[in-house]
Image: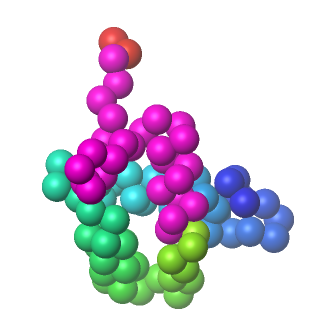
Amino acid sequence: MILPTKHLSPERSIISVSSEILELVDSRSTVSSIWSSLQNKHKASLRFSDVPYDWFILALDFLYMVGAIDERNGLIQKVKSNAA
């Protein structure tokens, strides 16, 4: 589910969906604006396998659990790493 398998295509894995979402997050992102941007990105690229909303939420959860995003005052923000 997180990684692609024999039965799960790479485009549908949580890690792939998470990377797409992370590219769309900016300083003023809400959950609904990210969802809308992801849908528009898929329509523009003519992808046949749209990401269902539950997979989108799982990908957001994954990004939060690994410390890549955070929520502040209803906005989703990328977490700045302190690594040099």
Quarter occupied by the C terminus: top left
Residue nearest the viewer, comparing 56 with 43: 56
User: Residue 33 location in percent, x, y?
Assistant: 26, 70
- Who's the residue at 33% across and 35% down the image? 79
- Who's the residue at 54% across and 41% down the image? 65
Instruction: Decide: is 26 above or below 37.
Output: above
Quarter occupied by the N terminus: bottom right
Is 73 on the left or on the right of 42, as rendered? left
User: Residue 16 location in percent, x, y?
Assistant: 54, 58
Instruction: Decide: is 22 above or below 33.
Output: above
Instruction: Decide: is 80 above or below 60.
Output: above
- Residue 28 seen in this snapshot: yes
- Who's the residue at 36% across and 72% down the image? 35
Say whether residue 78 is magenta. Answer: yes
Please provide the residue range marked out in magenta: 56-82
- Who's the residue at 18% across and 49% down the image? 27
Q: Quadrant of residue 54?
A: bottom right
Is 25 on the left or on the right of 8, as rendered? left
Residue nearest the viewer, comparing 38 with 5: 38
- Residue 41 seen in this snapshot: no
User: Residue 28 location in percent, x, y?
Assistant: 16, 55
User: Residue 47 location in percent, x, y?
Assistant: 47, 82
Way the structure is coloured: rainbow
Residue ranking furthest to the front? 73
Say whether residue 36 is magenta. Answer: no
Residue ranking furthest to the left? 28
Instruction: Decide: is 64 above or below 13.
Output: above
